[in-house]
Image (cartoon, rainbow, N blue to C red):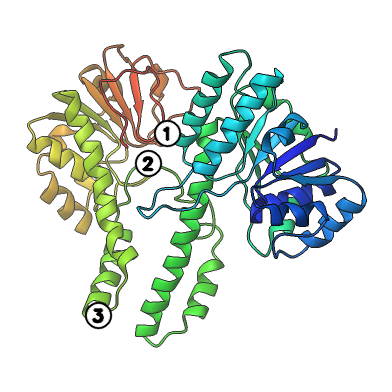
Amino acid sequence: MAYTIAVFGLGYVGATSMACLAKLGHRVIGVDIDAAKVGMASRGESPIQEPGVAELLESAHNAGLIGATTNAADAASQSDLCFICVGTPSRPNGSADTTFLRQVIETIAQTRRETERCIPIFVRSTALPAIHQELISLLEVTLQKSQPAAYCVHPEFLREGQGVADFFDPPRIVFGCTDSEVERFCADLYPGIDSKVVQTDPASAALVKYADNCFHAVKVTFGNEIGLLANSFGVDAREVMEIFCLDTKLNISPSYLRPGLPFGGSCLPKDLRGVVSWARQESIALPMLEHVSSSNEAQNQLVIANILRTGAQTIGVIGLAFKDDTDDLRESPMVAMVEHLLGKGRSIKIYDNKLIPDELIGANRRFALDSLPHLESMLVGDCARLVADSELVVIARLGLDVDFAALPWRRDQVVLDLVGLPKDMEIAADVHGLYWPTREGSARLKAVS
């Protein structure tokens, strides 16, 4: 089904979207406060320099599929739906300036109220979840509940210089819809484009865009810091990173890209310290790598603080080693957590079926006994007993042959989920996620943020 779509903002994203939507057969009305941009779009000329856009606009103009105007209300009133592509530039303090975004939403909301038409809004402009919530509230107030919000956060993933190619071959298409009134338009927006489509809530959709760009920034910085390190040894950094990228099992993959416990073990902390120590010795600035350990430690301290905030005196810990299917305690974040809680006078019981104190050897044994000299007295062989005897239970590992749903949970018991329990797992307790919603909604243990 072809729609009439008003595209607000004829900058890089808007002009590219206008051209590509018309290519898909939609009729598109471009909207901008800049009369020069509007004039160019009206004539089928591209207001931006982007490969392929000028040709698509010219073709769409010849087919009578595009127009442009400076009158935002008029464009909205003629359209089946609106695409918002206005800029959200940085203010001097670093925050996003959402002035134009708010103005457009206000205009569309007023038009919807006056015409008594529910014109869905697809926001491609980048803004944080809190901004979108404010805009959704603005819509609801203006419309006075006469219409659903019909608001969708629809992030774009267009690279400059590759915008047209990325539009027609996106890595995924994300819709964060408020209701079915806007959701029903999603299926027909991109006919013929074969891509994974994700339907989620507006806040999650908004944050995906920031996760993308922050990670891209991290990757660029990481590559350059490894370049500095390589150069200090007379090594060709290009060769190092080419070999690095060959590992699509761990390096260039979803591995480790999950929220959860801080890292630990015998390798990552040691090797990171070694690199940072060398760089300092050689006066090489690696600010990102230098701050990784402090960020990692901050995660552990936040979890500890949230545990202490509950006031629980008896605490059960399920999983002590730093990863599944191992008894390696070296620099395990859970060992540091237990050590801190013991120092605060808490009574701790631990269940870890891979951990047998008499079988710990070498550096692993030394680390365990130096950190937790009374480890053996804290270990229990029955996870059900640990749950029954604890006010608060910390779930730090899943791979321990434990049927979590069958344990003797109590409604008055707090469970801190550090691993991301399956959403369909029923646990009859007050379960709180680390960086995900709680199960019961209790405010006693605030999620780490």
Going by the image, does 222 lie left or right of 206? left
Q: Secondary structure at mark 3?
A: loop
- Mark 1 burial class by Cα count in 10 Å: few <14, some 14-19, many 20+: some
Give the residue type that dot 1 points to. Gly
Residue depicted at 24% across the width and 39% down the height: 302
Which residue position is annotated with label 1? 420
**Percent coordinates x, y for residue 72 in the rendering:** 67, 38
> Which residue is at a point 86% across and 43% down the rendered structure image?
25
Type of the residue with mark 3: Ser
Which label is found at residue 260? 2
Q: Is residue 96 left or right of residue 281?
A: right
Q: Is residue 317 left or right of residue 347?
A: right
Quadrant housing residue 142? top right
Mark 3 neighbour density, 10 Å: few (under 14) some (14–19) many (20 or more):
few
Is label 2 in contact with label 1 (beta carbons under 8 Å)?
Answer: yes
In the picture of the structure, the residue carrying the numbered disc 3 is 283
